[in-house]
Image (cartoon, rainbow, N blue to C red):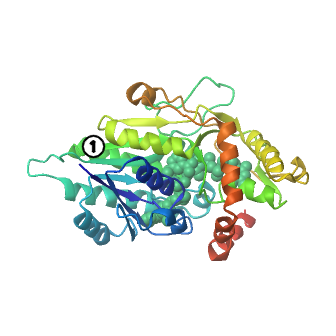
Amino acid sequence: MSKTYLVTGGAGFIGSNFVLYMLENHDDVRIVNVDKLTYAGNLENLADVEDDPRYAFSQTDICDKPAVKALFEKYQPDYVVNFAAESHVDRSIKYPEVFAETNVMGTVTMLNCAKEAWEQADGTYGDHKYLQVSTDEVYGSLSIDEPDTFFREDTPLNPHSPYSASKASADMFVKAYGDTYGFPVNITRCSNNYGPYQFPEKLIPLMINNALHHEKLPVYGDGMNVRDWLYVADHCKAIDMVLTGGKTGEVYNVGGHNEKPNMFIVRSIIAECSKAVDDPAITEALIEHVTDRKGHDRRYGIAPDKIKADLGWYPETAFEDGIVLTIDWYLAHEEWMSHVTSGAYMDYYKRMYEGR
Ligand code: NAD
Ligand code: DAU
């Protein structure tokens, strides 16, 4: 029987990839995309499916309880996948309140509306599931001198940035709903994603865009901070698998087993962009070391053992393939890039960056 997914933040980077992934891989789904359309949300990402009868969109703030409640009444979703969030660490350092509002209060509002909609007379919740899309950043930071240590699902939460503090708080509310009300939840905690439709405030699309335009490539600090990069389609597949196969109440870490220092990523982008457009002016001379991010986490690393053992998920896209796919996508979508890098939102971003 067809299942209805209420997907929040479906116009953002991972959310839009997830909506497209679900509609492409399942005939029997209905997707309701609930997005406020902040600077990070862009309906152009979903132009290919806007007329698909299995897809609906509502411009709604997840903090707006009456509006969210009305969506539950109208669409009677089986599942909620909560992607909606303020997602950029640098913005959170400057503007923490908005992160608390959307990431914490928005999550509590979604949990509350789902609980009210799904609760049955006997206090159970039927065949429903609420999945919180969280992040490995809630675990804090690992040492680069201990490369064999990884974040595990039972690693204590130790967030450092206002962004990760807001995501950890949200995770605690999700856990509390499971523990207190027996509410059917899962939490996924994923490492750094890259791929199509990522807003060019994040490392990979920012570096691709700047390299192609011969602009400086701003590397924070010594550039030796390590992130574990995962191609976005692999993350979407993991969420799909956890929703339907994950044991209720469990946390699943999702990672690429692909840890790289930022300098490696930037150098790879320079080499691949230069090759893709046959431009010898794209060189490492564009790299500029700038002031480090405040409280900059040194290393993230996930060994995705649990999700592999329980659900058979593993990262399918090798970084050397994924980065070429990503650069090719940005080259083929110059209009998308110029649209999202122009206008008030990008001015706001630039002001923020220049003010660092
Ligand atoms: P994004 O910033 O690209 O997209 C966020 C989306 O949420 C946008 O469409 C935005 O309009 C929407 N949104 C923001 N506030 C809203 C509100 N109040 N109500 C409704 N919609 C709102 O983010 P992303 O990179 O796609 O991340 C999606 C989720 O995945 C986030 O929860 C993030 O914490 C998590 N995550 C991201 C990564 C990553 O590498 N990008 C990794 C792990 C987890
Ligand atoms: O780990 C998952 C997280 O990954 C997600 O939860 C976040 O939503 C997502 O934004 C991402 O956080 P990061 O802070 O790791 O990603 P970002 O792309 O901002 O930065 C990656 C690394 O690159 C980090 O060490 C900071 C560095 N960096 C970033 C930018 C934007 C630079 O050196 N220069 C830059 O201009």
Q: Residue at x 68, y 73 (%)?
A: 342
Residue 181 is situated, as x and y percent measured from the top left of the image, at: 21, 46
Which one is nearer the viewer's eye here, 59 or 144?
A: 59
Q: Is mark 1 within 8 Å of ligand 1?
A: no
The answer to whether any part of residue 258 appears in the image is yes
Residue 46 is situated, as x and y percent measured from the top left of the image, at: 49, 63
Q: Which residue is mark 1?
A: 178
Occupied quadrant, residue 243: top left
Secondary structure found at label 1: helix
Occupied quadrant, residue 65: bottom left
Q: Residue at x 80, y 43 (%)?
A: 267
Which one is nearer the viewer's eye here, 89 or 284?
A: 284
The answer to whether any part of residue 298 appears in the image is no
Residue 59 is situated, as x and y percent measured from the top left of the image, at: 41, 71
Q: Residue at x 55, y 46 (%)?
A: 232
Q: Quadrant of the C terminus?
A: bottom right
Relative to 62, does residue 211 appear above or below in the rendering? above
Amino acid identity at mark 1 = Gly
Left/right placement of residue 140 relative to residue 9 reads right
